[in-house]
Amino acid sequence: MKVKPARLFEKPAARIVREVEMGSWPRRVWVEVDGMVCDICAGRVRQGLEDIEGVVRADVDLERGEAVLIASRERELTQEEVAEAVEGKVILSWARGPLSRVRGGSSSDASAEPSDGSPE
């Protein structure tokens, strides 16, 4: 099993970064995913994304921290529903906010200050 322990300090988040229409075929949607720690997280994120109405398939890449969705052309996906589908699925998602603040923030939580007040 692949594990990315440093990602335990990332607050789970997902955002659509690109969409491509494929003619009459379903469209592809690239989603950046923060906070996936292991293969179990990736599988749970895949399930969450595939539960979104209109998503036919989700291919999740733990190493790259992204997912590529094959989605119906009839329905637009929103940032909010993609974020909701991911945020509760990663392992220990409830603890990630406090962990990122203790560590001094993460790349996905740019507003957090280091806990000792010094630059990272």
Image: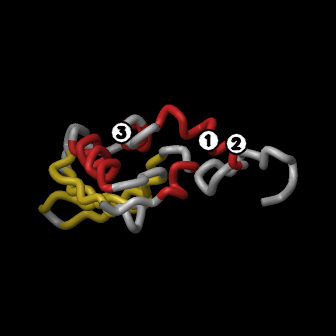
| Residue type marked 1 | Leu
Crowding at label 2, few (<14), some or many (≥20) Cα neighbours within 10 Å? some
Q: Residue at x 51, y 55 (%)?
A: 7
| Viewer-closest of 118 and 78 | 118
- N-terminal label among 1 and 3: 3
Mark 2 — residue? 102
As measured in the structure, the alpha-carbon distance from the residue carrying label 2 to the one carrying label 3 is 22 Å
Q: Secondary structure at mark 3?
A: loop
Percent of width and height locating residue 49:
28, 45
Mark 3 — residue? 89
- In the orientation shown, which residue stands out farthest toward the top? 94
Q: Residue at x 63, y 48 (%)?
A: 109
Mark 1 near mark 2, Cβ–Cβ under 8 Å? yes
- N-terminal label among 2 and 3: 3
* Image-based side of 10 in relation to 30, left or right: right
Q: Which mark is residue 99?
A: 1
**Quadrant the N terminus occupies:** bottom left
Position of residue 87 relative to residue 35, above or below, is above
- Scheme of colours in the image: secondary structure
Q: Which mark is residue 52?
A: none
